[in-house]
Amino acid sequence: MRTSRRHGPPSVSAWTRSPRRPLTSTGRSTLIAPRQRGTISKTRYLTLHPHAMPTSKPAHEQLEHLLRTGHVLTTREAADRLNVSTRTILRAAKKLEGRGLPVETTHVGNMNQYALSEAERYPESGDRYTENQLLALIVAIEAGRSLLRPTPLTAPLKAVYDDLMTRIPEQNVFTLDPNEESSRWYFQEARSVPIDPDIFETVRQAIHEQRTISIDYMNASRQTRNKGRVIDPLVIGTQNGAWLCVAYCHMREDIRDFNLVDIQSIEVHDTHFEPPEDFDPILHFDKRFGATTGESYLVRIRVAPEVAGYFRRKKYHPTQQVDHEGSDGHLIVSYDVEGLKDMHSWIRSWGPAVTVLEPEKLAQQIQEDAEAVAAQYASQA
């Protein structure tokens, strides 16, 4: 793997843009004079004392802090403590409940009194984690290990987990044993082959610095190698196990996906870019059915009764919609997708239990596949 920088550009900390980010005629950011070099700021780790009262945070966060540190307060007491109105406290309590915090509310006279159960409070000493918060961290780390397996982020994640376990006193674990709990969860590992660590880090840094890059890229579907393809990397994402760099391609003049596994070398440019104003990563990924993209289609399928339960229980795509349910239990299901390649493969995996109603193009492809398979087996009879 080869990574390089053109003309030895300075690090991102040595450059600055004007507040309005003046643009060139091509819409690219223009770099202005480097800042004067100074001392490099060191990484700082923030430690919050469990009984420190934050003063600049929203009322609901301050109220949560009081309740988690064991306070039992009426509406008036909380209002006086935070120097806000009782109406603000009422709204703050409702907001905490809306976010899933089980606030115990009782009536004292004509006022509410708020408290949290022991399990939701911060421990008396040590790290500020409730049992539920610790469980969420363990599960998130286990899920992250599986998802990040092809990337160089697995080792740092494990280091965070190991550090977390050493900093949580045994008496703060309650009924939860972190070492045993991690073995009680399973997440399917990403199916991508390992990504070159240098490629991954260079792409990530280019996204962070908004720098244009050139890549040598192997197109897996066409089995062709593109040398020096110039792109503006926008985001790293995963789709069906594939780790993708979504980028503006200068050659295609459009947004394209590049599998990180297929990037063979990178050259970082001096030039910065501005992301397209209309680019939304959520919309970019939600429309497609798999790792490939293309023209937009409305796909409607008939689902046989024997597999209809799967479609009632699971959304196979964000746009999945059940349009009709027949008296015999069959379903008519629709999808709004970009590209048909992955949809084609997915429908074939259901065999005769799923029939394409539209578009006609997709139905014809499935029919031709079925006829080819039938002919192949007939020739062997």
Image (cartoon, rainbow, N blue to C red):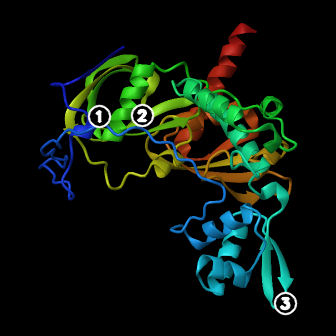
Q: Secondary structure at mark 3?
A: loop
Specify which label sits upstream in the sequence, 3 or 2: 3
Q: Is residue 339 left or right of residue 47?
A: left
Q: Residue at x 19, y 30 (%)?
A: 9
- Secondary structure under the numbered disc 1 in the rendered image: strand
Q: Amino acid at mark 1?
A: Ile
Count of picture labels: 3
| C-alpha distance separating marks 3 and 2 | 60 Å
Please identify the quadrant where the N terminus is shown.
Answer: top left
Q: Residue at x 45, y 18 (%)?
A: 196
* Residue on which the image places disc 3: 109
Mark found first going from the N terminus, 1 or 3: 3
- Closest to the camera, between mark 1 and mark 3, is 3
Mark number, residue 231: 1
Contact (Cβ within 8 Å) of mark 1 with mark 2: yes
Q: CA distance from mark 1 to mark 3?
A: 66 Å
Which picture quadrant has residue 199? top left
**Kind of residue sitting beneath label 2:** Cys
Q: Is residue 57 above or below residue 343?
A: below
Label 3 with label 2: CB-CB less than 8 Å: no
Q: Nearer the viewer, residue 263 or 361?
A: 263
Q: Quadrant of residue 89?
A: bottom right
The residue drawn where x is 68% and y is 36% is 167
For residue 160, above or below residue 31 = above
Position of 324 with respect to 278 (left or right) is: right
Q: Considering depth in this image, is 354 or 364 the residue closer to the camera?
A: 354
Q: Secondary structure at mark 2?
A: strand
At label 3, the amino acid type is: Gly
Which residue is farthest top?
380
